[in-house]
Amino acid sequence: MHKEHINNKRLNELLDELKIKKPEIYEHSLKVAELCNQIGNQLELKPVDLRELTISGFFHDIGKLVIEDEFHPIYGGKILEVCGVSGTIRKAVYQHHELLDGTGYPEGISGEDIVKNSRIINVAEIFANANYEIFNFRENSPSAKAIELLKNNPERFDSTIVEALEDVYNYKKESDNFINTYLFF
Ligand SMILES: [Fe+2]
Ligand SMILES: [Fe+2]
C-alpha cells in the first residue's frame, strides 16, 4: 500500500461515522480485521500485504453506511475510491461476498478471479458472525460449528485459508486450556 495514496483523515472519519451510526457493524468490522490479521499472519504474508489485508478487513462493510443490502460492496468500493484508497484494498472490499463456486455477489465471479484478500475476509466473516467474542471451545460451540461449516464447503471457501483459520483457532484453544489448567486447578 502506498501510504501517500490514502487520505487517512477521511478514513478515520469514516470509521468514526460507522461507530456512531452503526455500532454493531463497527464492532463486526474490528473483529473481521483482527481475524484477517491472524489468518494472514498464519499464511505468512509479507508485512506490507498483511497491512493491506487488515485495512481491507476494517473497511469491508463501510458501504453499509449507505446501504445494508447486497449492494453494499459496490458502495464500499466507491466510498474508498473517493478517499483515494489503493486499488488492491478497493477490490478486496468490492469482492468480499463473492464465493469460490460463483454463487456470491455482486458479480458472481468464481475461483481465482476472486482476490485472495476477499477470500480471507469471507472466511473471517463466517467465523466472526459465530459469537467469536465468546470464544467458546466446547464441541458444538458456535465457533466450532463455524469451522465445520467452512471445512464442509470447500467449493465455496478456500481450503488453505480455512486451514489457517483452524490453526489460529486451535492455538487459541490450547492457550485457553493452558490458562484454565493453571488458574483453576
Ligand atoms: Fe461483514
Ligand atoms: Fe459485507
Image: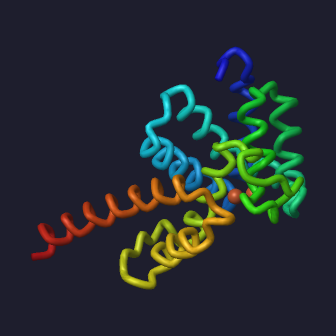
The residue furthest left is 185
> For the C terminus, which image quadrant?
bottom left
The answer to which quarter of the image holds residue 77 is: top right
Position of 103 with respect to 182 (left or right) is right
Query: Viewer-proximal residue, 9 or 167?
Result: 167
- Evaluate whether residue 16 shows in this view: no
Image-quarter location of ligand 1: bottom right
Residue 170 seen in the figure: yes
The residue at the point 81 percent across, 60 percent down is 102
Q: Nearer the viewer, residue 50 or 45?
A: 45
Residue visible at 72% across and 58% down? 100
Residue 43 higher or lower than 136, as above or below: above
Pick the quarter of the image with the N terminus.
Answer: top right
Q: Position of residue 180 (x, y in %)?
A: 20, 71
Q: Determine the residue positioned at 49% across, 35% down.
A: 45
Query: 104 or 81: nearer the eye?
Result: 104
Nearest the eye: 9 or 30: 30
Above or below 146: residue 54:
above
Picture mark count: 0
Seen as rendered, the residue at the extreme bottom is 140
Q: Position of residue 107 (x, y in %)?
A: 89, 53
Extreme residue toward the top, this view: 4
Here the colouring is rainbow
Question: In the image, residue 16 lies at what x, y percent?
Answer: 70, 43
Left or right of 120: which side holds 163? left
Residue plotted at (36% across, 81% down): 138
Placement of 80 over or under 140, stated as above or below: above
Q: Is residue 13 left or right of residue 106?
A: left
